[in-house]
Image (cartoon, rainbow, N blue to C red):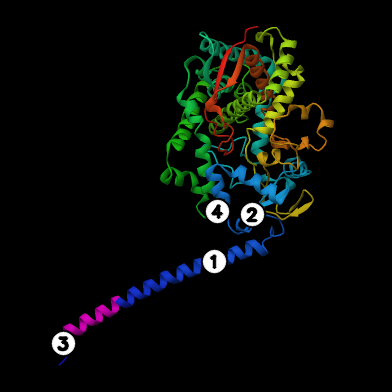
Amino acid sequence: MPDWADLKSVDLVSVATLLKLHRASIAFSVVILTIVYFATRAIYNVWFHPLSKFPGPRHRAAFKIPYLVGMWGGTHHRIVKDLHDQYGPVVRISPNNLSYITAQAWKDIYAHKKSRDLEMIKDPEFYVRNPNAPSIVNGNYEDHARYRRLYQPGFSARSLREQEPLIQRYVTLFISGLTRECEKGEVAVDMVQWFNFVTFDIIGDLAFGEPFGCLEGGETDWLQALNQIEEATMRIRVVQHAPLVGWYARKIVNTFFSNDAMRGAAEHLDLTEEKVKRRMANNSPRPDFMEHILRQPEGKGFTFGEMLSNSATLIQAGSETTATLLSGAVFLLCKYPETYKLLMKELTDAFESEDQLTIENTTRLPYMDAVLEEALRCYSPAVPGFPRQVPQSGAMIDGQWVPGGMSVTVNHYAAYHSTLNFERPEEFLPERFLDPDAFPNDRRDVLQPFSMGPRNCIGKQLAYAEGRLILGRFLLKFEMRLGPKAEGWMDQKGYVTWMRPPLEMFIKLREN
């Protein structure tokens, strides 16, 4: 007679063994299918994809991971520049992305089109959505046109003239603060911080009717938060590229990748809301960006959410870009003493003291303009490209047909540092903007640091005015030289703008 207990035990062991083998078989099949899927996808991307005719490394054509890794690490701009050096004016930098560095590509991608159907919308995988509402940066065609129309009076030439006393007041505070630092002679200061102070206070008053108090009180929590936004935005941007979960990128990053940068970005939005409410409660007329918007009839201005999203954008774009330009300009002037001398000669020939400078009379300084243009080329505040999506009908870009749905961009850093566009591109040579005949191979029309077309930077005129005024007054008041800690300062990470480390500079009052 069989021992039924033993048989039952044997059967259970067999069933368990079969289940384990079955689960292992399923897992193995899933792994194999995954490998086959990605291998098939890679083969398609490299040899059969609509962009397969464009030059570029095969591993980037096959997978998006190298593209995202460069963005995450803040090295994307340098990698793309090296790829253009190797492959030429157009490079396929990921399966669906093309990078260009030509003037014609600027026109084909960003310039005005004959009809809306031909407009290239901003690539939704790249632009990070504001949690409150769309902004002037990432709004659709209708929203952007409405935002720009409402903001335009605040950025007009007339408004700039009315805003000059306000701007001059903060530049004077900037000069006075640095003068106090120099009371006992030459002193080391961080010029990145000081340029942030003045531009941040100016944009605070223009956007909200009151400064942030940096020039009078020093570093603020808000300025610290502002400096962290780029890293936080980059993390969300990378996760947005993930299939299926892209719409939940902000929540995913806050849950799994939360750090000081993400907390700083959230604090920026909270502080913006507080300031917007205070400005809306201030009924006194003043020549700032909100005045025209707040005077609109009910339903014709911004919603409260739009006020928040656009204000948060203006604070960042309106302060960081000018501070970046000024930091790069003084660093490069110290690196090129002959250029520094030529600029000082122009300034001292035109003015007896720094307080004589105005927004208007600084426009009559050709060498100053050339210095700022060359600083924008060497150290553009906009680091990468800003991708657009080709319309479904396709488009001709730089002489080649690109099918619809693809992502295309002109990369600032790669374009401005390419020998295809500029002679001696790694040198700081303002003369290239004064004497074109001396640089016959330069393609100066490729320099578009404020972009071009219907979505170019609305604050371009203000940025130039601030740049000339702040730089001119600073140079006439102080002598400057780089400190030892500034060596290699321009070797920085870049996301949308540069992650600027402190810029140690020794300054003292100019004797004359």
Task: Identify the residue position indicated by label 1 in the image.
Answer: 37
Q: Nearer the viewer, residue 309 or 256?
A: 256
Q: Amino acid at mark 3?
A: Asp
Decide: is 31 above or below 167.
Answer: below
Look at the image and say whether residue 8 sits in the magenta stretch. Answer: yes
**Mark 2 or mark 4, which has the lower sequence index?**
4
| 3D distance between C-alphas at marks 2 and 4 | 12 Å
**Mark 4 or mark 1, which has the lower sequence index?**
1
Task: Identify the residue position indicated by label 2 in the image.
Answer: 96
| 3D distance between C-alphas at marks 2 and 1 | 18 Å
Q: Amino acid at mark 2?
A: Asn
Residue 393, percent across and down? 73, 54
Task: Identify the residue position indicated by label 4 in the image.
Answer: 65
Q: Dividing the picture into quarters, in which one does residue 511 lie?
A: top right
On the picture, is 220 further left or further right than 24?
A: right
Residue 214, percent across and down? 50, 19
Q: Foreground mark, 4 or 3?
A: 4
**Mark 2 or mark 3, which has the lower sequence index?**
3
On the picture, is 463 further left or further right than 349?
A: left
| 3D distance between C-alphas at marks 2 and 3 | 67 Å
| 3D distance between C-alphas at marks 4 and 3 | 60 Å
Q: Which mark is residue 3?
A: 3
Q: Main secondary structure of the magenta part?
A: helix
**Mark 4 or mark 3, which has the lower sequence index?**
3
Please state, as top left, top right, bottom left or bottom right, where the C terminus lies in the image. Answer: top right
- SS at badge 2: loop
The region drawn magenta spans 4-16
